[in-house]
Amino acid sequence: MKTLGLVGSRGYVGRELEALVKRHGGLELRLAVSQRDGLSAADIAAEKLDAYVLALPNGASGAYVDAILRARADAVIVDLSADHRFDAAWVYGQPERRRGEIRGATRIANPGCYATAAQLALAPLVGRLEGPPSVFGVSGYSGAGTTPSPKNDPENLKDQILPYALTDHVHEREVSHQLGMRVFFVPHVAPFFRGITVTVSATAAATTTREELAALYRDAYAGEPLVELTADVPVVRDVAGKHHVAIGGLSVASDGKHVVVVATIDNLLGGAATQALRNVNLALGFPEREGLDDNVTVTEQR
């Protein structure tokens, strides 16, 4: 058995991750706390656990990382915030693209939820596009967290979709950085609770057909059990409470150059908790999908 500590257990993602870990055959959840529980970073680090998952707001992980490293330098740390996604000293934890680097790593930056869906939708197109692609993203309001705000208030969202962070969103920078190409991204929040859909619109550098586009995606994700390719446009309700990303709706305009791809993912699981547990598994030497045999949804609409 390996020991795990979860910091940020009261947030939506923390709750989902706690449920997954409890079904894991090789992990003991020794510690599950929130910032409001009164334990200091030093108290948490003093447990000297094998691994820690930090499910904290952006900007809050630094003190915990420093304390953990002082107490146990070889502890695995998976940070769900954006604090280390641009840090070359940390491995970017997207298994489909970085599996070999994640195995045995001790510093892992978990990708953002929008960024996970957008990158998997875009990755097969890297090097094949003319100009920056545009990504239109829509998330359920659980993506805005538990702290009350206009973005997670069902009454405020009723009968509308709310665009926000129109430029320079952290996930726009994240996807551009990780794929090595400029990407335009505009997020929106809608009056459903969980799930994300992203629609990628891009111009191919050379003319292509829908059949060629579909073959490109089949080749890219052959053998990836948590990437589901579908001929139809994937919809949010079909991935809610699930671990995988669904990619489909592949379309090519009559000019042979304008391509569209749609991806959906559960922002709390596939875009966060599921990916974090996969990263812990790879880092500690467990089978990648240990603990993921059953889809687990503990956070319902509220």
Image: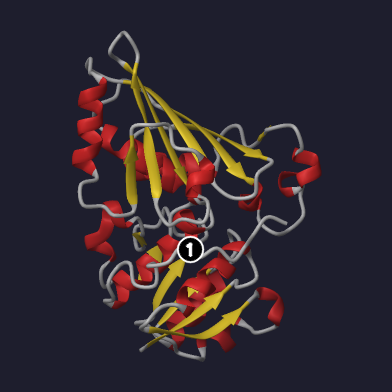
Q: Position of residue 287 (x, y in %)?
A: 27, 72
Q: Is residue 153 visible?
A: yes
Q: Is residue 141 left or right of residue 177?
A: right
Image quadrant occupied by the C terminus = bottom right
Q: Is residue 115 above or below residue 129?
A: below
Q: Is residue 73 left or right of residue 164?
A: left
Image quadrant occupied by the N terminus = bottom left
Q: Nearer the viewer, residue 232 or 163?
A: 232
Q: Residue at x 66, y 56 (%)?
A: 145
Q: Quarter-wise, where is residue 60 in the image?
A: bottom right
Q: Is residue 16 left or right of residue 301?
A: left
Mark 1 belongs to which amino acid?
Answer: Ala
Q: Residue at x 75, y 39 (%)?
A: 157
Q: How many marks?
A: 1
Q: Is residue 112 above or below residue 2?
A: above
Which residue sits furthest top? Answer: 255
Mark 1, other Cα within 10 Å: few <14 / some 14–19 / many ≥20: many
Q: Quarter-wise, where is residue 281 in the image?
A: bottom left
Q: Nearer the viewer, residue 169 or 255?
A: 255
Q: Is residue 189 above or below residue 106?
A: above
Q: Position of residue 244 (x, y in %)?
A: 40, 52
Q: Residue at x 54, y 44 (%)?
A: 237
Q: Position of residue 120 (x, y in %)?
A: 35, 43
Residue placed under numbered mark 1 in the picture: 273
Q: Nearer the viewer, residue 234 or 7?
A: 234
Q: Dot 1: what SS? A: helix
